[in-house]
Image: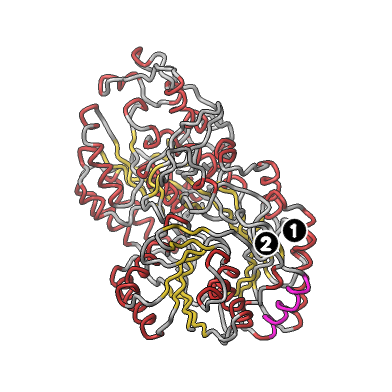
């Protein structure tokens, strides 16, 4: 997916105004501030990430596109409860003014515990569905979830999973940068459980020590030709230094 | 004798160029032969009902035509279909002679319901086949033919038309003068030799400039069209020849008051500032397709497609600031390609092909009569597997396997990817394109 940085509202500064940024909103107050920021953005991406419980406020702003000229064109929604799907469907039905060339990209982050195949069916208008995983046990559901996603022609993608636990191409974090330090090559080796030591992907894995009890690390230690070759592609991909690339 | 030439196209209302070349050449030497020609459109390929109706329609057309010979011109989307039709024809009327030709066919397609296979270009083969059917030539003297005679396979010597000007201009056979798009060939073959492509198989030859001048003017004076496509593999191989031809188009565009768009395929590394400047001076709009396929040095090495990335980058920079429209294509799943190496190619394009609003990518298809398909290292029996050496000259990095052994519509396995990964790549491209369309 396209390069973007996830920045908390309170961390946003004018240094980001021409960067591809998604503002992460934690509360209603932050939401108001986020809309003010979005109106001043110079980059084409005007993104918001928020919990589905805050959707009601967003819908009003989205519906008011004609007046506001399209404040948000990228909306990433973290599903808090299954009932909130109704609000997402409401968003999907909003007709965007074609004359103003308004677009709205919808991304839905679904925790494994809330996932049903029916969500994929109901959320056809949602452009991207990301599965959020919280524990080793939840990983057991992933093959079936992936099967459903392929059935609905969606690229299977997961969040919060250590890179040793999933085929790396499906890891959301591979495709984004650390928000506050997006223009630096960040070494993520710090804050790892000691079990991760020596893993070939340790520098690129977002998995943090405080979460270690939720997953059992399976570090990729074998540096034989076979393993090196297997990960050569992804390492070349994540090691690129071109921070202006869209992707 | 009545001959029915048939083809199948995914688009509607397209001039049947290949079939018309055959008709024109055949009539030149056999003016007494009645030639009927029809190119059927797939229409909606996803519709089972439509496809089944197409089969009934085609067979009905054949039976009503009452031909002595039915010759199918095949491409990647119609190879399987033509074989099925051949079988059906023999059931309905075993007296009809069935000929299979086109870039896709080769020895593997020989079977009881197919009387002759034309390998390579069809003009000489079809003309000499008619000589044979009239009793004027023995089969061994018919060039470019594969057939079975008295239980043994006859494979004749290959020959191409050396002087392309001998081939009548295909549009002169056409009674229909209105098309949305016209396609013109100014050369055959390709100076490059990419392992995935069949363009390089025939020798590179050109139609002469006087031939093209005379016939281009004929097109402009007699036909109604909005798009003129030069279908040469790399139209800018010889810069001055390309501009001589475009100057002709400009001359006739102005003379006949046409408002058209010209389409061609260009090799990006051969685009320079002078080329762009000269193209922009024309009154017609130019839209070009740029073959790129991959930015991976390993993939390009295996494909025998050396590419100067710096020159491609410069060319894209020039095009980005010009009024020339372009489309640059990627191919995923080539031997040596992986999901992430393909993503690197996408990254290159998204960074430099700024005018292109989405990623255009096709999955690799192992075409018959290409080097990738022809190189076999096994026991000599038919095998769809090809092997290539890796950087250490190891000859065992796996093979390329197709879904259908004889047709090349889908590759299900390469030495580095399988069908799941290929499909996931497609889904990833779709996902990126959706996002690109939004901001």
Residue at 22%, 41% (x, y): give it.
Answer: A144
Q: In the figure, is residue B25 to the left or right of B407?
A: right
Q: Tell me if residue B288 comes above or below residue B309 in the rendering.
A: below
Dominant SS type (magenta): helix
Query: Would residue B210 be counted in the magenta stretch?
Result: yes
| Residue indicated by mark 2 | B324
Q: Are marks 1 and 2 on the same chain?
A: yes
> Counting residues from the N terminus, which is met first, the one under dot 1 or under dot 2?
1
Query: Would residue B122 be counted in the magenta stretch?
Result: no
Q: Tell me if residue B244 comes above or below residue B351 in the rendering.
A: below
Estimate the x, y position of residue B197 in percent, counting from the top left.
56, 52
- Whether residue A33 is visible, yes or no, is no
Chain letter of disc 1? B
Residue closest to the eye, B207 or A194: B207
Q: Tell me if residue B321 comes above or below residue B313 in the rendering.
A: below
Tell me the element at label 1.
helix
Estimate the x, y position of residue B396 in percent, counting from the top left.
46, 31
Residue at 56%, 35% (x, y): give it.
Answer: B298
Residue span colored magenta: B209-221
| Residue indicated by mark 1 | B276
Residue at 25%, 42% (x, y): give it.
Answer: A145
| Total labels drawn | 2
Please tell me in which quadrant of the rendered image residue B422 appears: top left
- Whether residue B330 is visible, yes or no, is yes
Q: Tell me if residue B6 comes above or below residue B76 in the rendering.
A: below
Please tell me in which quadrant of the rendered image residue B127 appears: bottom right
Q: Are marks 1 and 2 in contact (CB under 8 Å)?
A: yes
Residue at 40%, 52% (x, y): give it.
Answer: B410
Q: In the figure, is residue B61 to the left or right of B164?
A: left
Chain letter of disc 2? B
Q: In the figure, is residue A83 to the left or right of A155?
A: left
User: Dot 2: few (<14), some (14–19), or many (≥20) neighbours within 10 Å?
Assistant: some
């Amino acid at each position: 997916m396209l390069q973007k940085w996830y920045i908390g509202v309170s961390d946003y500064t004018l240094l980001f105004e021409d960067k591809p940024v998604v503002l992460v909103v934690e509360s209603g107050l932050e939401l108001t501030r986020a809309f003010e920021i979005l109106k001043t953005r110079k980059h084409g991406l005007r993104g918001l990430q928020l919990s589905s419980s805050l959707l009601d406020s967003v819908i009003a702003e989205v519906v008011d596109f004609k007046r506001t000229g399209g404040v948000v064109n990228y909306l990433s929604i973290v599903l808090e409860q299954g009932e909130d799907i109704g609000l997402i469907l409401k968003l999907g039905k909003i007709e965007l003014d074609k004359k103003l060339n308004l677009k709205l990209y919808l991304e839905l982050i679904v925790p494994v515990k809330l996932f049903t195949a029916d969500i994929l069916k109901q959320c056809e208008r949602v452009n991207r569905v990301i599965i959020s995983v919280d524990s080793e046990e939840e990983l057991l559901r992933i093959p079936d979830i992936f099967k459903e996603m392929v059935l609905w022609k969606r690229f299977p993608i997961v969040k919060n999973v250590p890179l040793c636990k999933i085929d790396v191409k499906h890891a959301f974090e591979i495709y984004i940068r650390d928000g506050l330090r997006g223009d630096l090559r960040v070494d993520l080796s710090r804050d790892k459980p000691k079990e991760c030591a020596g893993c070939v992907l340790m520098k690129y894995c977002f998995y943090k020590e405080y979460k270690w009890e939720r997953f059992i690390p399976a570090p990729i230690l074998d540096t034989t030709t076979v393993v090196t070759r297997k990960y050569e592609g992804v390492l070349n991909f994540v090691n690129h230094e071109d921070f202006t690339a869209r992707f | 004798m009545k001959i029915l030439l048939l083809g199948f196209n995914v688009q509607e209302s397209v001039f049947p160029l290949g079939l018309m070349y055959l008709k024109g050449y055949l009539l030149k030497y056999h003016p007494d032969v009645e030639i009927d020609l029809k190119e059927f459109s797939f229409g909606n390929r996803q519709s089972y009902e439509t496809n089944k109706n197409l089969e009934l329609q085609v067979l009905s057309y054949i039976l009503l035509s009452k031909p002595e010979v039915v010759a199918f011109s095949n491409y990647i989307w119609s190879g399987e279909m033509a074989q099925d039709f051949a079988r059906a024809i023999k059931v309905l009327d075993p007296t009809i002679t069935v000929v299979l030709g086109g870039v896709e066919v080769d020895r593997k397609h020989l079977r009881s319901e197919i009387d002759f296979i034309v390998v390579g270009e069809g003009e000489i083969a079809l003309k000499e086949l008619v000589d044979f059917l009239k009793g004027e030539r023995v089969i061994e003297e018919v060039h470019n033919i594969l057939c079975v005679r008295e239980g043994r396979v006859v494979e004749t010597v290959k020959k191409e038309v050396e002087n392309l000007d001998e081939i009548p201009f295909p549009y002169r056979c056409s009674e229909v003068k209105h098309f949305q798009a016209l396609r013109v060939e100014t050369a055959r073959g390709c100076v490059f030799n990419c392992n995935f492509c069949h363009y390089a198989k025939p020798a590179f030859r050109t139609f002469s400039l006087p031939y093209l001048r005379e016939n281009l003017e004929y097109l402009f004076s007699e036909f109604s069209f909005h798009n003129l496509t030069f279908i040469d593999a790399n139209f800018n191989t010889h810069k001055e020849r390309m501009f001589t031809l475009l100057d002709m188009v400009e001359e006739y565009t102005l003379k006949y008051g046409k408002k058209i768009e010209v389409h061609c395929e260009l090799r990006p590394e051969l685009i320079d500032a002078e080329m762009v400047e000269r193209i922009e001076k024309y009154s017609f709009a130019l839209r070009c397709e740029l073959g790129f396929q991959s930015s991976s040095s390993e993939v390009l090495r295996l494909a025998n497609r050396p590419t100067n990335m710096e020159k491609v980058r410069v060319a894209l920079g020039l095009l980005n600031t010009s009024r020339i429209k372009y489309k640059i294509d990627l191919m995923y799943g080539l031997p040596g390609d992986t999901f992430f190496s393909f993503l690197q190619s996408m990254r290159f394009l998204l960074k430099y092909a700024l005018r292109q609003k989405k990623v255009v990518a096709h999955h690799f298809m192992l075409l018959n009569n290409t080097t990738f398909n022809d190189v076999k290292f096994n026991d000599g029996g038919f095998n769809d597997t090809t092997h290539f050496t890796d950087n250490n000259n190891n000859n065992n990095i796996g093979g390329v396997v197709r879904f259908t052994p004889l047709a090349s519509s889908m590759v299900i396995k390469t030495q580095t990817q399988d069908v799941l990964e290929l499909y996931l790549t497609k889904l990833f491209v779709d996902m990126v394109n959706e996002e690109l369309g939004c901001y």
